[in-house]
Structures are given as structure tokens and as C-alpha cells.
Image: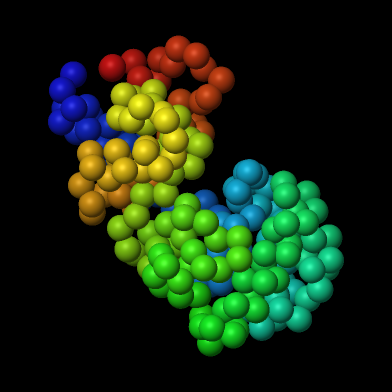
Amino acid sequence: MKLADKVKFITSTLDDLYPEPDIPLDHENNFTFLVAVMLSAQSTDKKVNEITPKLFEKANTPAKMNKLEVNEIQIIIRQIGLAPTKAKNIKKMSQQLLEKHQGEVPNTFEELEELAGVGHKTASVLMAQAFNTPAFPVDTHIHRLAYRWGLSNGKNVMTTEKDLKRIFDKHLWNKLHLQIIFYGREWCQARKNKCDCKICSNF
């Protein structure tokens, strides 16, 4: 199958399954969204959504979060992977927002990536889903499926991101990011060595 035909088939299949994909992380505002995305690293969205209501009840703004001790945050998020590090980063990130950004989450890649605990992928998720700026955050599902579908060589997530940005139209990036994640969870799981899902079975 030619690349152009493959791209058309993938996008149409994903559009049929997930015409309007919702953000899977529960949040109230851009700050709570940022915290949820930070917590989701090496954890599941489901687990994050179980943990965050209690955290956001206490602190749903940078000012309130900054008033909590690191240990208080850690106790609430203890079931999340890397909880000690994430608690420190959430506290420091809240301080940075207050000191440098008047308590607002910034809307540029550069400013986001300067925040504690915020890497390129987290910044990309915020830019795409909170600020509607074209980005293609690559998580483990997207990295795996891009390789499985022959869209990237699977070297690393940065290479996969560049390949996907080159292959797909820019206006599709934000939607595709969510669609591929959902597809990877529901249809094209990692444990399948030879996948016979709707997309894999056509390549």
C-alpha cells in the first residue's frame, strides 16, 4: 500500500471510531490539566483520574498548591508511579507559575518546558489540548503503533514525532494524537505480537 493510501486509510478508520475524541484526563482548568498530565507519566489515565479529585479539592490553583507541603502532595498521589519526584515537581512548578507567570499556565513550548517536571511531551499535550496549537505528543501507544504501521522506524519518540508530523497534515495532529492513543488501548495492544486489528490487518 502506498504511503498516501495508508495515511488515508488510517485517518478514515480512526475518524469512524473516534469522530470527536475527548481528553481522557479529568481537569477543571489549565493548571489542573497540567498537573494531571504530569501525573500521567509512567501511570495510567484511569489511575490519575482516581487520584486527582482529592488533590484538586485541596488545591486547584497554583496559589493553593503552593501552600501544601511536598509531603502532603506526595501522600495524596502515593499510588502514582514516581510519586516523590512528582510531588516535588508539582510544588516547584506551582511556585514558578506564581513567580514568573502571574499564576497562569504559559502558552508557549519554551515557557512550559522551563517548568519543573515538564518535558517536551507534557508541553506538547498542553499546547495541543489546552491551547489548540498544532503538536503531536508521542506516548508509548503512538510510538508503538507508528512503528507497527510502518510510519516510523521506532528508534525513539523524537524520531517518531518528526515522522508523524511530516506524514500527516498539520490540522489533524491534535485529533490524531488522541485517536491513536485510544486505538492503541482498545484495538492494537502491545501484548499482541501479530495484530489482526482493523488497521494492522490491512498492511
For residue 118, which quarter of the picture?
bottom right
For residue 2, which quarter of the picture?
top left
Residue 158 visible? The answer is: yes
Task: Give how far across and how far down residue 103 sits, in percent.
Answer: 56, 83
Q: Is residue 195 above or below residue 29?
A: above
Q: How is the image coloured?
A: rainbow
Residue projecting furthest to the top: 194
Residue 16 visible? The answer is: no
Task: Give how far across and how far down residue 81 sits, in percent.
Answer: 72, 46
| Residue occupying image coordinates x 73% and y 49% | 82
| Residue occupying image coordinates x 44% and y 39% | 157
Q: Is residue 53 above or below residue 49?
A: below
| Residue occupying image coordinates x 73% and y 64% | 88
Count of numbered circles on the image: 0
The one nearer the camera, 200 or 133, is 133
Task: Give how far across and how far down residue 69 sits, in percent.
Answer: 81, 73
Task: Give how far across and how far down residue 188 sits, in percent.
Answer: 46, 26
Q: Quadrant of the N terminus?
A: top left
Q: Quadrant of the C terminus?
A: top left
| Residue occupying image coordinates x 51% and y 83% | 101
The one nearer the camera, 161 or 134, is 161
Q: Is residue 37 above or below residue 2?
A: below
Q: Along the horizontal axis of the image, is 59 left or right of 69?
A: left
